[in-house]
Image: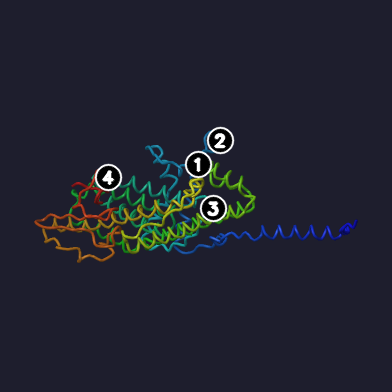
Amino acid sequence: MCYPKTMPRIGVLILGALLCLAGCRSKEEVKFSSWSPEASAKPITGSFAKLVQIGEAVEQAARSKAFYKGKPTPPITTRTAFFDKEKKQANAIIGSNKSSLIGLVGAKIEFQYQPVGLGEPPLYLRGVRLIGESMLWDMEDAIAAQQPDLAIQRCGQLTRLGSQLLGGGAYEASLGISLMDRARATLAPELGQLGAGQLGVLAKLISGSISGRPALTDCLENETSNMLLALQQAQDLAKTRDFKKLEDKLGKSTHDEVALLDSVSRDLSKVASVFDWIGEDIQARGKWHVDQMRKPNSDVSPPALKSRKNWRVMYRYFASNLDSLAPYVKKCAARTQLFMLECYLRQKVKLKTPLPTSLDVFSTQAVRDPFTGKPFYFKSGAGEFKVYSAGSDGIDDGGESNESFDSPDLVLESKN
């Protein structure tokens, strides 16, 4: 009987090596999409550098005072509620940085946005927020002391600061919107008590903020870039199977999804498909929100999200910001513009001069409703007027609104 010759040992080794290479090659063929270039800190200059410097100076001063019985405590810049004692402490820490910031926002701040991805929010924003709080306290004290001129100045300054923060991403825009909304809501109920001259000054200040604000699409485009950078950083960690660090970055709420990602990581194509699903949605959703901000169209629906219920928490971490940010920006922008129009129209009533029959006398930017892309609804006659936004549903309900002044139509926070 003839038997085949035994393969020489060297042949076995070569065959084994070839099989190994073939297996390694198949793994290397799993290609991960590139969502964002590697983050690199770029030097900042000009007015934006000064803004960062002011905010960081307040943050550092707050940290230097954050001790109790020799042990470090959270700095006052992390507080959300302030009593008289904390207000006094905050103002002492802020010092001359308040006047520096007020002087800075008098000119246009040229934002030089840099996404942070999975990193912490920019520290300078904590200092800027504390100064904003102090300016809001000035407004409240001025109104209580019946000194509306100071309240008007602070409202204008806060609106200008908040408007310019719309040149950043979600962190910056959210702070800016909060400052604008709170300043406006503080002064709007007092409009009926202001004289014609004061209304004119306030209208001019708000008008300047509107004309000098960045495009409302800037923060949406910047946040899209930020979300894609975060996704890229998370994908890089998943590719190297560093799932512990990935969970540390994303937080404990994503534990189950990270564990599931770990369990399928032997097949990198499954890992890549999860990130592709999220990344493609971020890109499509970002484009849709930007397009809708530029040219609202209720007939165009947002991108449909493919159902992958096992990854919903991870998806929300990366891709949900735009769905929250876009309406937040629209609502604030609409109310800020309505605030300006209300001041001008109230001034005419005070002066007993004829009200306009349409909003054509104002700039297109001032009267464009961010929800519809068309002029606000306006009615006038016999010394009375009504001006309002169609709101999120885009439908004219005659200016009817709820206690929050935002549905079904969106109106200014004032019943006077």
> Tag on residue 65?
1
Mark carried by residue 404: 4
Residue at the disc numbered 3: 274
N-terminal of the two: label 4 or label 3? 3
Residue found at x 34% / y 47%: 136
Front disc: 3 or 1: 3
- Label 2 vs 3, first from the N-terminus: 2
Identify the amino acid type marked 1: Lys
- Closer to the camera, 169 or 350? 169
Residue 229: percent from left, percent from top: 53, 57
The first of marks 1 and 4 along the sequence is 1
Sequence-first tag of 2 and 4: 2
Q: Position of residue 254 (x, y in %)?
A: 53, 43
SS of the residue under disc 3: helix
- Where residue 308 appears, as percent x and y from the top left, is 49, 49
Q: Name which residue type carries label 2.
A: Gly
| Residue shown at 45% from the left, 51% from the top | 125
The quadrant the N terminus occupies is: bottom right
Q: Residues within 10 Å of mark 4 (few under 14, many from 20)?
A: few
